[in-house]
Image (cartoon, grey):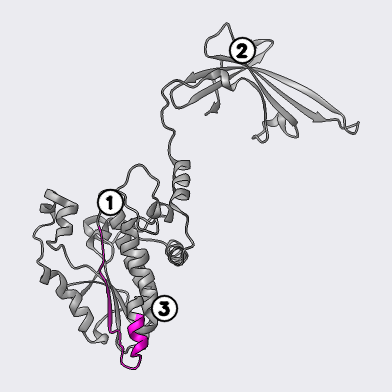
């Protein structure tokens, strides 16, 4: 685009941009990051290759009569709606699904063209399209032997003919915001019974607005680094197994309770302390003392302290420690097995 801008500025009186076709793409089987530390499929198809480039080109397109903006999407977008932003931009998950990264970006292109078509009206004809399944090197690399399920594949001319038509057809014949295949607008959802529209692949207006906001922020550099994304993703991953069971002894001692959901008798309590002690007579058992205080209703700065004795029953695995509690009454544990603590 910088090269185009330089050309335009040097001969500004004659430069036109009649059509911009965003057709750059990738379908990868392994997680790959761009120079900007953005997942390549998302960056190529949607963030930079369609949104950023389209934004840069829009003033020139609007200044050119009967211009059009064409995003080459895919029939693959029928498989999903656009997911949450965290899902589509994650680079920290251990498992990467290149097929769905592609699907999400392609659905995003269709939604983006809908939004831009509403904003620009007839100033620029903005559409998305599906070229059909074309026999290319990219399809060979992405699908391998499984490409037989896409047959009969189109040749290059059959795939490009509809895109070329969108570039040269009279503007009044083009429906802004539509999703085209073979010169004809298509339905955008096929998730219902017998390939009816259904609702599974439809996004709410709020979800689309969130996508547009985040595309803008990320396109101007307001986005987390790869390291920050890794940390965020790690916070949502399940615990990984350790080589040895959890060391129960490391949990013993006094624990100060900063916040809890109080039972009826704990409402208004302060200075809550949990005291844990291994029970030498019972394997996998912990003596639990819960101590808490109440302010005196008659004396200022005076508190009364109470204790509750319980028995903790512990089951350790390589990833978690599960505790249930038996309250004690008259010194004897009542085997209620109430869920208490999971770490």
Does dot 1 land on a helix, a strand or a loop? helix
- Inspect this view and state whether residue 149 appears: yes
Give the image quarter of residue 180: bottom left
Q: Nearer the viewer, mark 3 or mark 1?
A: 1
Of the 4 image quadrants, the one containing the N terminus is bottom left
Nearer the N terminus, badge 3 or badge 1? 1
Residue at 29% x, 57% y: name it.
103
At a point 21% along the width and 84% down the height, the residue shown is 169
Q: Is residue 247 above or below residue 46?
A: above
Q: Residues within 10 Å of mark 1 (few under 14, many from 20)?
A: some
Asked whether 97 or 187 is in front, the reply is 97
Q: Which residue is mark 1?
A: 98
Q: Which residues are magenta?
A: 5-26
- Element type where label 3 sits in the image: helix
Task: Give yes or no for residue 257 being in the magenta stretch.
Answer: no
User: Looking at the image, is mark 1 or mark 2 earlier in the sequence?
Assistant: 1
Q: Nearer the viewer, residue 200 or 112?
A: 112
Task: Mark 2 or mark 3: name the one nearer the start of the chain.
Answer: 3
Q: Secondary structure at mark 2?
A: strand
**Which residue position holds label 3?**
119
Residue 270: percent from the left, percent from the top? 75, 32
Neighbourhood count class around disc 2 (C-alpha, 10 Å): few under 14, some 14–19, many 20 upward: some
């Amino acid at each position: 685009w910088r090269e185009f801008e330089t050309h335009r500025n040097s001969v500004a009186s004659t430069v036109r941009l009649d059509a911009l076709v965003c057709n750059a793409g990738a379908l990868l089987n392994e997680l790959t990051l761009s120079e900007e530390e953005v997942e390549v499929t998302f960056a190529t198809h949607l963030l930079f290759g369609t949104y950023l480039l389209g934004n840069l080109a829009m003033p020139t397109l609007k200044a050119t009569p009967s211009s059009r903006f064409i995003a080459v999407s895919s029939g693959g977008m029928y498989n999903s709606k656009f997911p949450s932003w965290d899902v589509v931009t994650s680079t920290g998950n251990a498992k990467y699904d290149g097929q769905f990264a592609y699907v999400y970006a392609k659905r995003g292109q269709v939604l983006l063209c809908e939004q831009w078509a509403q904003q620009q009206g007839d100033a620029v004809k903005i559409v998305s399209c599906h070229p059909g399944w074309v026999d290319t090197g990219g399809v060979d690399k992405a699908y391998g032997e499984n490409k037989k399920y896409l047959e009969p594949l189109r040749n290059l001319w059959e795939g490009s003919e509809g895109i070329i038509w969108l570039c040269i057809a009279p503007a009044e014949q083009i429906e802004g915001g539509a999703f085209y295949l073979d010169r004809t607008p298509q339905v955008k959802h096929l998730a219902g019974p017998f390939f009816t529209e259904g609702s599974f692949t439809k996004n709410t207006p709020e979800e689309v607005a969130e996508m547009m906001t985040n595309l803008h922020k990320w396109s101007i550099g307001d986005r987390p680094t790869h390291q920050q994304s890794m940390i965020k993703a790690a916070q949502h991953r399940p615990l990984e197994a350790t080589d040895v069971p959890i060391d129960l002894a490391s949990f013993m001692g006094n624990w100060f309770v900063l916040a809890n959901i109080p039972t009826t008798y704990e409402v208004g309590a302060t200075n809550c302390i949990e005291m844990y002690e291994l029970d030498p007579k019972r394997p996998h058992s912990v003596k639990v003392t819960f101590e808490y205080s109440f302010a005196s209703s008659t004396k200022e700065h005076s508190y009364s302290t109470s204790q509750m004795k319980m028995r903790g029953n512990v089951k350790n695995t390589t990833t978690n420690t599960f505790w249930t509690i038996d309250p004690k009454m008259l010194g004897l544990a009542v085997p209620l097995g109430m869920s208490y603590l999971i770490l």
